[in-house]
Amino acid sequence: MPSRVRFAPRPQRRIALSASVFESYANIKDELFFNALEPCLGAHSGPLAVMRFEHNQTADLLGKIAAATELDSARVLAKQMIQATRGHFQKEEQILFRMARQFLSEDELASFGAQWAQKRTIVGAS
C-alpha cells in the first residue's frame, strides 16, 4: 500500500534547491563546454545531443519529484533520477571529457575551467 504522506515543506525546499543547482550546472556546461565542442562533434546528434537530452530528463524528473504527493512515487522517481545522473556522469567522464581533450587545446580547456569557476563563483580558481 503506497504511503499517502504529503512532503513536509523542508524536503520540498531541498528538492527545489537541488533543481536550481542542477539547472545552473547544466546551463553553464551547455553555454561554455558544449558550445566549444559543437564545431567538432555537432549539436543535433551524437554525444552532445545525448548530454542535452539527459540534462532535460534529469530536470523533468526533479520537477516530478517536487510535484509528487505520495512518498512512494517520489522515491521511485528519485531512484530513476539517481540512475540517470550516474549514467550521465559516467558518459561525461569516460567519453565526453576524453573527446574534449582530443579536440580542444590546453589553453581552451584552461579557459573553460576559469570561466566555469567564475560563473560558479569559485574563489581562487584561476
Image (cartoon, rainbow, N blue to C red):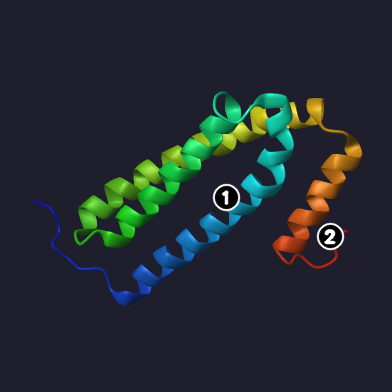
Q: Which mark is residue 118?
A: none
Q: Nearer the viewer, residue 28 or 95?
A: 28
Q: Residue at x 27, y 54 (%)?
A: 74
* Circle 1 crowding by C-alpha within 10 Å: few under 14, some 14–19, many from 20: some
**Is residue 36 toward the left or the right of residue 105 in the image?**
left
Q: Are marks 1 and 2 in contact (CB under 8 Å)?
A: no
Query: In the rendered view, does 70 fall on the left or right side of 11?
Result: left
User: Residue 27 location, x and y as percent?
Assistant: 59, 52
Residue in the image at 52% along x and 31% along y: 50
The dot on residue 26 is: 1
Foreground tag (1 vs 2): 1
SS category of the residue bearing label 2: loop
* Residue 86 visible somewhere in the drawing: no
* Residue 80 in view (yes/no): yes
Comes first in the chain, label 1 or label 2 = 1
Q: Residue furthest left?
A: 1
Element under disc 1: helix
| Placement of 83 over or under 69, stated as above or below | above
Query: Looking at the image, which residue is at 53% across and 39% down?
Result: 52
Q: Amino acid at mark 2?
A: Ala
Q: How many marks?
A: 2
Residue 55 sits above or below residue 17 on the image:
above
- Tag 2 residue: 125
Q: Position of residue 114 (x, y in %)?
A: 82, 55
Residue 16, image x and y in percent? 42, 66
Q: Is residue 74 above or below residue 5?
A: above
Q: Residue at x 8, y 51 (%)?
A: 1
Q: Position of residue 126 (x, y in %)?
A: 88, 58
Q: Amino acid at mark 1?
A: Ala
